[in-house]
């Protein structure tokens, strides 16, 4: 028998569902309880690393890719008198969301879910090795019908749903224990091939900067208990292959500009993000391309000072025309505008990969 953290669960899964692949073998779940957003919300378990889990071919659909995920802590108590029954998900067709399937699954797992089982203490992995969990069952844009609201929306922005799925694994969340993540675009953030976080973006455009913005749903909902906003640069692996790096605010800005751009999830960069960027682009060239309204802010000014000191003659900030942003302009126009504006400041922008 495989050396796993939850032998009883593993044996039971193998008995009823066939061979189970073991992922993150021997790794402990890393989580903490945090207070909900509303005053009367109960504490919610935030998982920053799933730890060991078992992958099976879901018996309730035509799955052949081991898309039924069961965490080794499934059915265990969370420290607040609640059993963690949400730790089993079919990522193929969401089969466990159907009452009869879920009831059948629970009946087979009854020894696991209704009494304590012996779970071995796993090893705590380093922060660099940790991965977060997706918000729930998601479907890649490429697997959705063309008429789906999310596909219609991204096409209205000039993006190809199939390419977004292929290059960035953009999906739509159908079911999640985070209610705000449901029916939103899910943009996963990878670093070194590991899932470090995700952003759930509202499908559609609202006036988030207008006078009634407080009554609107948030534009983005970010993965709880994840520090990707301070430690990651979206699309950094692809960006690093180019002679010039373009720093933008949001993921859609990076989609629009192209592979040589990376987003910093806002208008600031942490020290860690700055060091990360400079370690690759110090001897190349770089452009800071934030939304025009951020160009003259004190925060942006300090960021410009940092890069001008670290990359003298190789860095500049470019201000776009008022009322525009890197995600709304035609790509060809945007690239030419940035190249010419940078040249005026003595910085050569090269849209070529490093040899």
Image (spheres, rainbow, N blue to C red):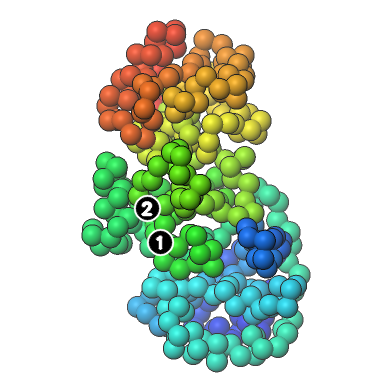
Element type where label 1 sits in the image = loop
N-term-proximal mark, 2 vs 1:
1
Q: Give the side of residue 57 with respect to residue 274, left or right.
A: left
| Rendered-image quadrant of the N terminus | bottom right
Residue 125 falls in which quadrant of the image? bottom right
Q: From where the camera sits, is residue 30 visible?
A: no
Q: Residue at x 44, y 24 (%)?
A: 292
Q: CA distance from mark 2 to mark 1?
A: 8 Å
Residue occupied by mark 1: 183
Q: Give the side of residue 212 with respect to residue 224, left or right.
A: left
Residue occupied by mark 2: 203
Residue 168 against residue 9 in the figure, above or below: above
Q: From where the camera sits, is residue 50 visible?
A: yes
Asked if the residues shown at circle 2 and circle 1 are in contact, with their CB atoms under 8 angstroms apart, the answer is yes
Element type where label 2 sits in the image = loop
Of residues 311 and 114, the one drawn nearer to the viewer in this rendering: 114
Residue 346 against residue 49 in the figure, above or below: above
* x then y, percent, for residue 354: 43, 26
Find residue 265 and name its label: none
Q: Residue at x 56, y 60 (%)?
A: 133
């Amino acid at each position: 028998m495989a050396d796993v953290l939850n032998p009883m669960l593993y044996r039971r899964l193998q008995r009823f569902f066939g061979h189970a692949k073991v992922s993150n073998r021997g790794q402990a779940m890393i989580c903490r309880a945090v207070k909900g957003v509303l005053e009367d919300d109960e504490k919610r378990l935030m998982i920053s690393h799933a730890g060991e889990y078992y992958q099976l071919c879901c018996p309730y659909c035509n799955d052949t890719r081991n898309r039924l995920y069961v965490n080794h802590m499934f059915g265990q108590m969370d420290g607040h008198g609640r059993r963690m029954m949400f730790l089993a998900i079919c990522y193929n067709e969401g089969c466990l969301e159907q009452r009869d399937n879920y009831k059948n699954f629970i009946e087979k797992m009854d020894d696991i879910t209704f009494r304590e089982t012996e779970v071995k203490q796993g090893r705590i992995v380093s922060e660099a090795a940790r991965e977060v969990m997706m918000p729930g069952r998601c479907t890649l844009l490429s697997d959705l019908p063309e008429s789906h609201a999310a596909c219609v929306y991204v096409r209205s922005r000039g993006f190809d749903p199939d390419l977004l799925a292929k290059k960035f694994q953009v999906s739509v969340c159908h079911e999640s224990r985070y209610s705000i993540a449901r029916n939103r675009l899910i943009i996963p953030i990878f670093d070194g091939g590991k899932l470090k976080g995700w952003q759930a973006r509202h499908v559609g455009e609202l006036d988030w900067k207008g006078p009634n913005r407080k009554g609107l749903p948030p534009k983005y909902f970010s993965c709880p208990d994840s520090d990707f906003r301070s430690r990651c640069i979206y699309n950094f692996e692809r960006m690093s292959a180019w002679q010039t790096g373009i720093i933008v605010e949001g993921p859609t800005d990076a989609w629009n500009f192209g592979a040589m751009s990376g987003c910093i999830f806002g208008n600031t960069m942490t020290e860690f993000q700055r060091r990360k960027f400079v370690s690759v682009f110090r001897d190349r060239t770089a452009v800071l391309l934030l939304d025009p309204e951020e160009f003259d802010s004190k925060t942006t000014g300090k960021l410009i000072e940092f890069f001008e000191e670290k990359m003298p003659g190789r860095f500049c900030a470019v201000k776009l025309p008022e009322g525009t942003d890197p995600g709304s302009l035609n790509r060809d126009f945007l690239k030419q505008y940035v190249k010419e504006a940078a040249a005026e400041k003595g910085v050569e922008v090269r849209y070529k990969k490093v040899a």
